[in-house]
Image: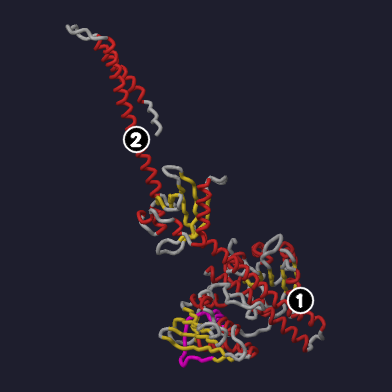
């Protein structure tokens, strides 16, 4: 062991020792004048030097004891740092046996420290990774050129615990005996997070592929229908058939977009229910009748078994109809010709129960837990005959839960059919409160200004409105539209929101500030259709907000029902 370095105060102490030794020698030489046998000077000098050396040795012993105490304290601190470190540390010998382990290391192995000492570290590593561990230890002990620290990611199997993913970092120890220090970091959560990200990435890719497939499918019939319309005799059967195809495919595309928007709203909790008292048997029967032509086309039998008593619930009729549509559509999608689907309603205690059961493909156990999550589907063949984006059942679950109900799934397995059951709280008996159906009324011709930067969208809307008798002007940006409106004020402005020069919100604000345009009916027509988008439109001064793609019928209805902006008592915000 190297000699401990003297501390600064030791020099002063050594000087004091020399002074005391000198004083003793002087007293010995200049003692009291007593009569005694003369001392030999050499002997006295030797005695003085011995006393001096004795004092120095005592001082050195004190310093050594102090240094040893300091080293022991430092060693204890380092031992505590080793023992209580959050990282698992192991010292293993050349044979791979555990020589030391800190508390975190013992916990990682699921053992007391005493029980871990002497055991081969490789026993706690899965067999497929033991060769990597051996190679790691060999490289560290061999002194081969390389990084000072070597690392590997291994799977460890603690005693009576789940396997752990561990990053093992090794370095060589020379004293007190040659060995290897292993620092083991549990990276299980990180690896799980990485795997979850990979799965999400795969699901995203699968969803984008499915979305591309679902969007491309209607394009062929749309193009073919347009080809026929351009060449067929107007009013002929071929022209009518082509128009019918285009209408169906446009409806299909609209449904895809609506499902995507509804899924986003459910995820964000922004869907608002328009509740009313309704009778569930009647709602389900209407939904089934709307679906029946599709079932007949696919040669699948649809049977409705209504409850023998009224089932009153407080719910949003549009959203509950959407639940039934999605369940029936899902059953039809996975049921082949000749099979059957049953829609059964009954009372179960304080709940109204609606069950859709089919005799179709069935559902594998490993898939069931995933089906109510967005963008999740069972396995499909290359032709994606069943289609869809994996949104229907997720929307069913979200909408039912918004109504305070539950939805469950049962299936005996592949080829055994499936059964979906919805339970909703029953309401007090009473008549359904429903708004009277709108009465058709003739809409007078009006002056309409369309502000839309998409040329095809603007021109197609202009042509359609002119065909039903309106006078239409078109502008392709916000500033041009506002200038056109000031020159010849229209009765109605249909305005996109995402416009160049001035956006739609700015157009509405400036129109409301212009005395000549204050009475104009402002309609926001946009692909931005979330609740916050609608609220922002109303704050800017729009009378209503219509999501793209809007049907001509809905726009015509708006034009027939429009009140003047001033008569609405609408308070314009500063948005």
**Residue visible at 31% across and 29% down in the picture:** 62
**Residue visible at 54% across and 79% down in the picture:** 319
The region drawn magenta spans 304-325
Q: Quadrant of the C terminus?
A: bottom right
Question: In the displayed structure, would residue 33 be above or below residue 223?
Answer: above
Asked whether 316 falls inside the magenta stretch, the response is yes
Question: In the displayed structure, would residue 308 be above or below residue 57?
Answer: below
User: Is label 1 or label 2 in front?
Assistant: 2
For residue 92, the mark is none
Query: What is the crowding at mark 2: few (fewer than 14 residues within 10 Å), some, or many (at least 20)?
Result: few
Q: Does residue 40 appear in the picture of this structure? A: yes
Q: Quadrant of the N terminus?
A: top left
For residue 68, the mark is 2
Residue tagged 1: 463
Residue 284, position as x, y percentages in the image: 54, 87
Query: What is the crowding at mark 1: few (fewer than 14 residues within 10 Å), some, or many (at least 20)?
Result: some
Residue 361, position as x, y percentages in the image: 57, 84
Q: Is residue 476 left or right of residue 306?
A: right
Residue 400, position as x, y percentages in the image: 50, 78
Name the foreground residue: 456 vs 170. 170
């Amino acid at each position: 062991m190297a000699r401990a370095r003297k501390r600064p105060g030791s020099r002063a102490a050594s000087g004091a020792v020399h002074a005391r030794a000198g004083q003793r020698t002087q007293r010995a030489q200049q003692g009291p004048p007593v009569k005694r046998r003369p001392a030999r000077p050499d002997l006295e000098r030797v005695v003085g030097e011995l006393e001096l050396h004795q004092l120095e040795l005592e001082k050195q012993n004190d310093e050594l004891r102090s240094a040893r105490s300091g080293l022991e304290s430092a060693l204890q601190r380092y031992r505590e740092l080793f023992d209580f470190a959050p990282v698992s540390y192991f010292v293993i010998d050349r044979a791979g046996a555990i020589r030391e382990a800190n508390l975190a290391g013992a916990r990682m192995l699921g053992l007391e420290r005493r029980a871990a000492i002497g055991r081969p570290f490789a026993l706690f590593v899965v067999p497929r990774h033991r060769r990597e561990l051996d190679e790691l230890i060999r490289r560290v002990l061999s002194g081969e050129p390389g990084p000072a620290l070597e690392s590997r990611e291994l799977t460890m199997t603690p005693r009576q615990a789940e396997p752990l993913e561990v990053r093992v970092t090794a370095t060589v120890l020379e004293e007190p005996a040659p060995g290897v220090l292993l620092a083991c970091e549990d990276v299980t959560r990180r690896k799980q997070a990485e795997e979850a990200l990979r799965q999400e990435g795969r699901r995203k890719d699968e969803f984008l592929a499915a979305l591309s497939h679902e969007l491309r499918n209607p394009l062929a019939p749309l193009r073919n229908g347009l080809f026929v319309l351009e060449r067929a005799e107007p009013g002929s059967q071929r022209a009518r058939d082509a128009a019918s195809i285009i209408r169906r495919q446009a409806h299909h595309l609209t449904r895809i977009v609506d499902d995507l928007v509804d899924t986003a709203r459910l995820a964000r909790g922004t869907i608002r229910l328009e509740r009313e008292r309704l009778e569930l048997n009647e709602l389900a029967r209407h939904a089934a009748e709307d679906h029946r032509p599709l079932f007949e086309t696919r040669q699948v039998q649809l049977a409705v078994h209504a409850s023998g008593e009224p089932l009153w619930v407080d719910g949003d009729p549009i959203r509950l109809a959407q639940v039934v549509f999605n369940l029936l559509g899902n059953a039809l999608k996975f049921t082949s010709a000749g099979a059957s689907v049953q829609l059964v309603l009954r009372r179960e205690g304080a709940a109204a129960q609606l069950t859709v059961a089919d005799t179709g493909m069935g559902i594998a156990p490993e898939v069931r837990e995933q089906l109510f999550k967005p963008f999740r589907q069972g396995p499909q063949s290359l032709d994606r005959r069943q289609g869809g984006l994996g949104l229907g059942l997720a929307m069913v679950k979200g909408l039912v839960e918004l109504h305070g109900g539950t939805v469950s799934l049962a299936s005996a397995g592949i080829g055994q059919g499936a059964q979906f059951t919805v339970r909703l709280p029953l309401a007090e008996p009473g008549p359904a409160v429903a708004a009277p159906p709108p009465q058709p009324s003739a809409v007078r011709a009006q002056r309409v200004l369309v502000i839309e930067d998409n040329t095809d969208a603007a021109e197609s809307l202009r042509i359609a409105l002119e065909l039903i008798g309106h006078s239409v002007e078109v502008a392709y940006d916000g500033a041009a539209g506002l200038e056109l409106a000031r020159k010849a004020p229209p009765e109605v402005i249909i305005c996109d929101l995402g416009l160049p020069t001035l956006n739609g919100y700015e157009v509405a604000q400036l129109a409301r500030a212009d005395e000549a345009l204050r009475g104009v009916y402002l309609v926001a027509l946009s692909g931005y259709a979330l609740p916050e988008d609608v609220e922002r439109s109303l704050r800017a001064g729009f009378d209503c907000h219509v999501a793209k793609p809007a049907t001509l019928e809905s726009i015509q209805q708006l034009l027939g029902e429009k009140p003047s902006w001033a008569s609405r008592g609408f308070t314009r915000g500063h948005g």
